[in-house]
Image (cartoon, grey):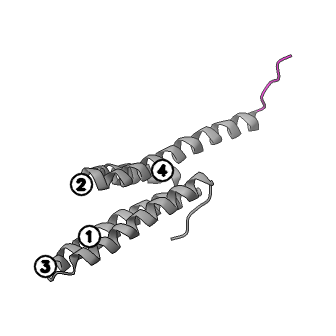
Amino acid sequence: MTEQMTEPQIKDTETQHTETQHKNLALLVYLLQALGFVTGGLTCIAGLVVNYLKMSAVRDTWLESHFRWQLNTFWYGLLWSLLAMFFWLVLLGWLAGGIVTIWIIYRIVKGALYLHDDKPIIF
């Protein structure tokens, strides 16, 4: 006995599939950001491009908060990293660089955990 899917069920399945794809994209960006520590930030730029290209697709969904969180992590991380390089000139850069590194790792881990739990993230 085969069960026919109704139109609302088909739309619900399509919505779930699309949400899963967008969730995987957000996870990809978290991974690219984490790999940025190994690649000198090159993969962070790739993640930034993904965020900007797909932002309209996740607008008004719970995943939009993750995309914004990732964008803020990149741009503020870049700003704080540049400040840490400046402070390196006055011999406090090691402290500032360490603080920035911990902050970026915290944001990547917190965002990935919230994403895993299917929760929006408040920034």
Which SS class for mark 2? loop
What is the three-letter code of the residue carrying label 2? Gly
Circles 1 and 4 in contact, beta carbons < 8 Å: no
Q: x and y percent of residue 61 in the render?
A: 58, 56
Going from N to C along the chain, the mark reached first, 2 or 4, is 4
Assess disc 3: are there few (<14), some (14-19) or many (≥20) residues with their C-alpha within 10 Å of its C-alpha.
Answer: few
Going from N to C along the chain, the mark reached first, 2 or 1, is 2
Which SS class for mark 3? loop
Which mark identifies residue 26? 4
Q: Which residue is mark 2?
A: 40
Along the line of sight, the residue nearer the viewer: 122 or 30: 30
Q: Which residue is mark 1?
A: 81
Circles 4 and 3 in contact, beta carbons < 8 Å: no
Q: Which residue is mark 3?
A: 89
Which SS class for mark 4? helix
> Going by the picture, which residue comes out furthest to the top?
1
Magenta part, dominant SS: loop
Q: x and y percent of residue 6 in the render?
A: 78, 31
Circles 2 and 4 in contact, beta carbons < 8 Å: no
Q: Kindly report which numbered mark, 4 or 3, lies closer to the viewer in this rendering.
A: 3
- Residue 60 visible in the shown view: no
Range drawn in magenta: 1-6
Residue lying at 39% horizontally and 62% vertically, measured from the top left: 71
Magenta highlight on residue 97: no
Assess disc 2: are there few (<14), some (14-19) or many (≥20) residues with their C-alpha within 10 Å of its C-alpha.
Answer: few
What is the three-letter code of the residue carrying label 4? Ala
Circles 3 and 2 in contact, beta carbons < 8 Å: no
